[in-house]
Image: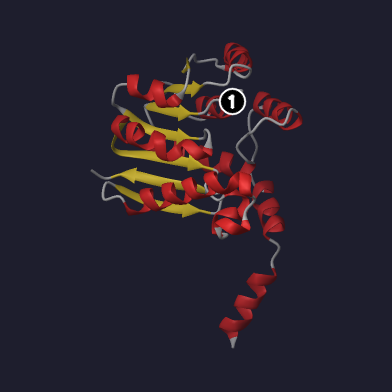
Amino acid sequence: MTDRFDEEALMAIDPERMREFICAMDKGNAEYLDKLEKEAIEGDVPIIRKDTQSLLKFLLSLTHPCNILEVGTATGFSALLMAEYSDADTTITTIEKYEKRIPIAKEHFNLFDKGKKITLLEGDAADVLKELNEGYDFVFMDAAKGQYENFLPEVMRVLKKGGLLVTDNVLQDGDIVQSRFAVTRRNRTIHARMRDYIYNITHREDLQTVILNTGDGVTLSVKTK
């Protein structure tokens, strides 16, 4: 009887209210990051959500990565977040191909990357990744969702054994649990590719992966071989 009551009580909780409560507990970011976040939201620029920011900061404190790779820079917010909350000797390489956002990211890095940790590589990640050497111990995947599966082989090549792959936006605002016929026709290709990606990283023998209902869905994958 108690179990049934607890289950019904949990089902009655509004997920958005729960998320707002969790986000309200975050102690906040550096002032310039709050400003950049506000500008990105007002400009309709994709940006990692508040609870994903908290998760990233926690993971950086836990793992102390030396060499971070970010796939998908946008205007530089998440790279700067990782620069702000990582160790002083951490280096960050970030990749962006969208020409309109690259100058904005460069400006933000010039203004706020105090430790000069960040290197921006311009171009399609599918090409740029092939030119990178092995040795990254932390990878943050936050680019075009339909391309994650295409990026994965090169990401796995450059990721060190024991390294952490963090992938954002894997639940697609809940669409991922729907049948392909329940999502809009224009989103069906991305829906199918994301399902393939999630299946791949959760079933590979060289990865140990957990899926979190944080932000718009995050997977954490440790390279085991």
The quarter holding residue 158 reads: top left
Which residue ends up furthest to the bottom in the rendered image?
1
Question: Up-down: is 132 above or below 151?
Answer: above
Residue drawn at the location 59% of the way across and 83% of the way down: 4
* Above or below 80: residue 155: below
Number of numbered discs visible in the structure rendering: 1
- Judging depth in this view, the residue of 89 and 92 nearest the camera is 92
Q: Residue furthest right?
A: 42
Percent across and percent down for residue 86 are 47, 29
Is residue 115 among the parts visible in the rendering? yes
Could you tell me which residue is drawn at 45 percent across and 38 percent down? 148
Q: Nearer the viewer, residue 52 or 72?
A: 72
Q: Amino acid at mark 1?
A: Ala
Q: Residue at x 52, y 39 (%)?
A: 145
Residue at 37% of width from left, 53% of height from top?
202
Query: What quarter of the picture does the C terminus occupy?
Result: top left
Query: Residue 62 placed where, x, y %?
Result: 42, 41
Q: Residues within 10 Å of mark 1 (few under 14, many from 20)?
A: many
Residue named by callout 1: 74
- Relative to 61, 181 lies left or right: right
Colour scheme in use = secondary structure
Q: Nearer the viewer, residue 120 or 162?
A: 120
Residue 68 horizontal/vertical position (percent): 41, 28
Q: Quadrant of residue 130?
A: top left
Q: Report the side of 183 relative to 85 (left or right).
A: right
- The N terminus appears in which quarter of the rendering? bottom right
Image x and y of residue 48, in percent: 60, 37
> Which secondary structure lies at badge 1?
loop
Asked if one can make out residue 87 in the rendered structure from this viewpoint, the answer is: no
